[in-house]
C-alpha cells in the first residue's frame, strides 16, 4: 500500500523542519522551502533552484504543493473583490479583498459554512460543512496575491470570513504561525486579526500560546439575553465568562482587544445598550467596531438609522472607549460582513 503524499502547506515551520530532517537533509533546508512556498509563491519543486535536483525529486516522491484557483471573481463598485473557491470535495468558500487608503486587507475563511448559527449572518444559515486544512486557509492568500498588480501587496489579514476560526483551532493557529513567520509570509503580528465569538475552552488554550496576533471578539449585545437570542453560542459560552477571560488575556504593550458589535435596529442599538456596554468593557484594554447590519432577504433584522448609530458611538466615546463605525464594503456583491455564502456568482471567471 502506497503512503499518501504530504501537502507541505499543511506543515508548520517546525513540522516542516522535522519532515526535512526525516529525509536526511539539513534542517536549514526547511527555511529555503518556506521562502519558496510563501515569499516567492512557488507552485512546483522545479522552481526551487537552490535545492539539488536529487533533493527536489525526493521531495516530489513523498510530498506535493497544493494550489487554490478562484472559480469566480466579482468586483464591487467600491473596489472590493470577492473570490469564490471550489475545494476538491465540491465545498465552496469565499475570500474578500478590501482596498482602503493605506491598507489592502484580505478577509479569509477558516471553515466551509459555520456551526455558530448567528441569526444576523448568512454564513451561519448555511450550517457547518467542514473545517479547512491549514493549506486551504493559506492558499487563499497565495491565490489572491497572484492577482495583484506589481508593487501592490496585501497589508493586513483578517480571519473573519466563513466559519469560526477557534472551532478549527489547530489548523487556524498553524496558518497564523505561517502568516507571521519571518521566512514565510512575514506579516507583522499587528496586521493579522483573528475574530471569534469567544469559545471558552479554545480562548483558555489560546492564552497559553506564544503565537501573536490581534484578537477580535464578536460581542453584538450588551446583555446575556439579547446575545443568546442573536448568537446561540452564548448559551454555552456566556458573554460574562468570555469577558472575564479577556480581562486576563496576556496582551503586548499598547495592544487592545477589538470588540465587534453588529448594530441591529430594536435589538441592541439603544442608548441603554451603549451604557451597558461601557460597564461590560470596564477594565479591558479595548476598542469597539460598530458594524451597521448588512441587510439581506433571509435576515429577519434591519439596520438602525444613522442617527441612532452615531448616538451609540458618542456615548461610548464619552465613556472613554474608542468606537469606530465601520463602513460597509462590498455589500452590492454580497461580500460584506455576514453575507458570505459560498455561492457561485454570475460574473467573469
Image: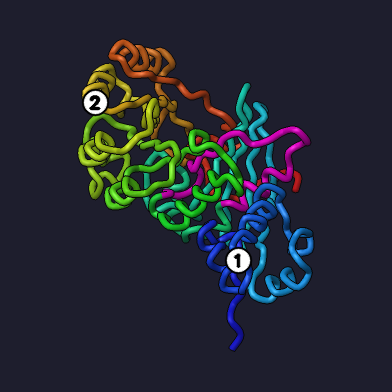
- Residue for badge 2: 283
The stretch of residues the image draws in magenta is 138-165
Q: Along the horizontal axis of the image, is 226 left or right of 58?
A: left
Is residue 241 rendered magenta in the image?
A: no
- Estimate the x, y position of residue 306 in percent, counting from the top left: 44, 16
Q: Along the horizontal axis of the image, is 346 left or right of 121?
A: right
Looking at the picture, tell me which residue is in the foreground, 242 or 75. 242
Residue ID at (47%, 52%): 172
Dividing the image into 4 quarters, which one contains the N terminus? bottom right
Looking at the picture, tell me which residue is in the foreground, 273 or 346. 273
Q: Along the horizontal axis of the image, is 235 left or right of 117?
A: left
Residue ID at (67%, 54%): 37
Residue ID at (41%, 29%): 302
State whether residue 322 is above or below residue 149. Answer: above
Q: Secondary structure at mark 1?
A: strand
- Estimate the x, y position of residue 259 in percent, counting from the top left: 36, 31
> Which of the 4 image quadrants contains residue 228?
top left
- Residue for badge 1: 7
Residue ID at (39%, 20%): 323
Q: Label 1 vs label 2: CA separation?
A: 44 Å
- Estimate the x, y position of residue 7 in percent, counting from the top left: 60, 66
Looking at the picture, tell me which residue is in the foreground, 65 or 333. 65
Q: Compare marks 1 and 2 and give the one earlier in the sequence.
A: 1
Amino acid at each position: 500500500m502506497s503512503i499518501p503524499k504530504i501537502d507541505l502547506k499543511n506543515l508548520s515551520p517546525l513540522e516542516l523542519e522535522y519532515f526535512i530532517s526525516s529525509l536526511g537533509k539539513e534542517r536549514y533546508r526547511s527555511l529555503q522551502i518556506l521562502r519558496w512556498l510563501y515569499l516567492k509563491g512557488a507552485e512546483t519543486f522545479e522552481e526551487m533552484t537552490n535545492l539539488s535536483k536529487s533533493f527536489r525529486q525526493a521531495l516530489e516522491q513523498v510530498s506535493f504543493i497544493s494550489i487554490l484557483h478562484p472559480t469566480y471573481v466579482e468586483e464591487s463598485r467600491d473596489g472590493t473583490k470577492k473570490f469564490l473557491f471550489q475545494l476538491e470535495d465540491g465545498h465552496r468558500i469565499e475570500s474578500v479583498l478590501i482596498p482602503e487608503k493605506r491598507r489592502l486587507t484580505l478577509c479569509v475563511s477558516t471553515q466551509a459554512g459555520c456551526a455558530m448559527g448567528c441569526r444576523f449572518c448568512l454564513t451561519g444559515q448555511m450550517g457547518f460543512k467542514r473545517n479547512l486544512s491549514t493549506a486551504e486557509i493559506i492558499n487563499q492568500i497565495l491565490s489572491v496575491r497572484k492577482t495583484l498588480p506589481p508593487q501592490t501587496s496585501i497589508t493586513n489579514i483578517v480571519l473573519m470570513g466563513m466559519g469560526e476560526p477557534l472551532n478549527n483551532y489547530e489548523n487556524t493557529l498553524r496558518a497564523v504561525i505561517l502568516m507571521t513567520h519571518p521566512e514565510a509570509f512575514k506579516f507583522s503580528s499587528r496586521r493579522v486579526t483573528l475574530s471569534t465569538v469567544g469559545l471558552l475552552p479554545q480562548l483558555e488554550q489560546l492564552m497559553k500560546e506564544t503565537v501573536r496576533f490581534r484578537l477580535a471578539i464578536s460581542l453584538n449585545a450588551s446583555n446575556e439575553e439579547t446575545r443568546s437570542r442573536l448568537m446561540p453560542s452564548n448559551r454555552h459560552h456566556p458573554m460574562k465568562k468570555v469577558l472575564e477571560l479577556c480581562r486576563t488575556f496576556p496582551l503586548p504593550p499598547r495592544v487592545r482587544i477589538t470588540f465587534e458589535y453588529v448594530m441591529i435596529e430594536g435589538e441592541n442599538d439603544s442608548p441603554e445598550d451603549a451604557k451597558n456596554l461601557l460597564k461590560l468593557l470596564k477594565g479591558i484594554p479595548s476598542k469597539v467596531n460598530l458594524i451597521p447590519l448588512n441587510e439581506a432577504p433571509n435576515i429577519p433584522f434591519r439596520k438602525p438609522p444613522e442617527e441612532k448609530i452615531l448616538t451609540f458611538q458618542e456615548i461610548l466615546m464619552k465613556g472613554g472607549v474608542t468606537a469606530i463605525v465601520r463602513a460597509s464594503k462590498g455589500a452590492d456583491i454580497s461580500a460584506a460582513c455576514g453575507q458570505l455564502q459560498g455561492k457561485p456568482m454570475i460574473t467573469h471567471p
